[in-house]
Amino acid sequence: MKAVHVLAAVAALALFALLAAPATQARAEIVLSYANFPPAITFPCVQMERWADEVETRTNGQVTVETYPGGTLLGAQDMFEGVREGQADIGCSSMAYFPGVFPLTSVMEVPVGFTSSTVPSLVLWDLYEEYQPAAFADFKVLAMFTTAPSNLMTIQPVRSLADLQGMEVRASGGASRVLEMLGAVPVSKPMSETPDALQKGLIQGLLSSLEVLKDFNFAETCPYETITNFQVYPFAVVMNRDVWESLPDDVKQVFDDLAREQSLWTGQYMDQHVDEAVAWSQETYGVEVINLSDEDMAQALATLSPMVDEWKVAAAAAGLDAEAILAKMLELKAKYEAEYGE
Ligand code: DTR
């Protein structure tokens, strides 16, 4: 009889546990897809994984983020359209790959002498918050950040602006314009096609932030790195507006609280990763880091200064107060350079 009682008690407990389980999971789980275009080890995907982890932790597992690196869900060029149409809930791309589409944030593509990723990432985020650019009206923006400034990675050394004349160098967007104005021959390609172009001898180098020396192993083919600190590439992480509207308020709050923090985190991650990638390239391949003379740097910036006016004309044509936006960007640049000791 006793054993029967125990059995009955166990069965009752089991039934209770079964019935109770759904009640403790009453908060429906939210699963969000997040598309990204470059390989998983590159910085846009590293920041994506960090955001996904933070969201899962801060929502106590209520939100799960399924990440799709390497263009497995959407490529760089399809990103904004794909998120707008709901092919992915969230996506990350660079506005520099869409000339003319993002007239306000393209102010970040004017070479004004940023020396890090941290400062322009914060500047971009503040500009976004202050001006709420129309180009993002269809989205919920979850973060914005930039690359570190662009530098030359070349097969032959570029020790002066003269060495750059006629050299075929890969870039994209505003960076291609920079090369053209300085007398090089820009070859516009997405980052993913660059390794092949280098191998085939189609280009003699590239212009980008230096962390790619390690992440794409460009240090092996490009032993000369010339510091130019040209323009940065602005990036945005956007969410489908309808999906955003469907989220509960506490989840929305988590995303909002994370936005500026994530932008700053990405800038700081990139800065330390650039340093690490350069050190790794020196140790692994003995690459040489070259600084241009002060005269050449001054001449380069003077040659590139019409890019400021080109941006102003394009921004004004898009109905923006170009002078005010540019002034605000420079004011924020000075503020954050002081704050972060640059
Ligand atoms: N420099 C831009 C953007 C960029 C910099 N690092 C990476 C890594 C992966 C993808 C893009 C980028 C470019 O050259 O495309």
Image (cartoon, rainbow, N blue to C red):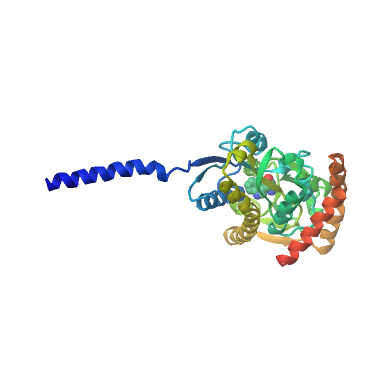
> In this rendering, would 50 be left or right of 115?
left
- Residue 224 coordinates in the image, percent (x, y): 69, 56
Residue 172, picture quadrant: top right
Q: Is residue 26 left or right of residue 12?
A: right
Q: In front: 57, or 50?
A: 57
How many labels, in total? 0
Image coordinates of residue 266 in percent, x first then y, are: 63, 54
Task: Name the image quarter holding the N terminus.
Answer: top left
Percent x, y of residue 228: 76, 57
Does residue 337 sit above or below 58 in this rendering? below
Q: Quick one: 306 or 286, which is closer to the camera? A: 306
Observer able to see residue 229: yes
Q: Quadrant of the C terminus?
A: bottom right
Q: Is residue 205 visible?
A: no
- Across and down, in percent, residue 14 comes to 28, 43
Task: Give the vertical position of 210 relative to 29 (above or below).
Answer: below
Outermost residue, left direction? 1
Query: Against 33, is 211 above or below?
Result: below
Residue at image coords 23%, 46% = 10
Q: Residue at x 22, y 46 (%)?
A: 9
Residue at image position (37%, 43%) is 21
In the depicted view, which residue is nearer to us: 227 or 138?
138
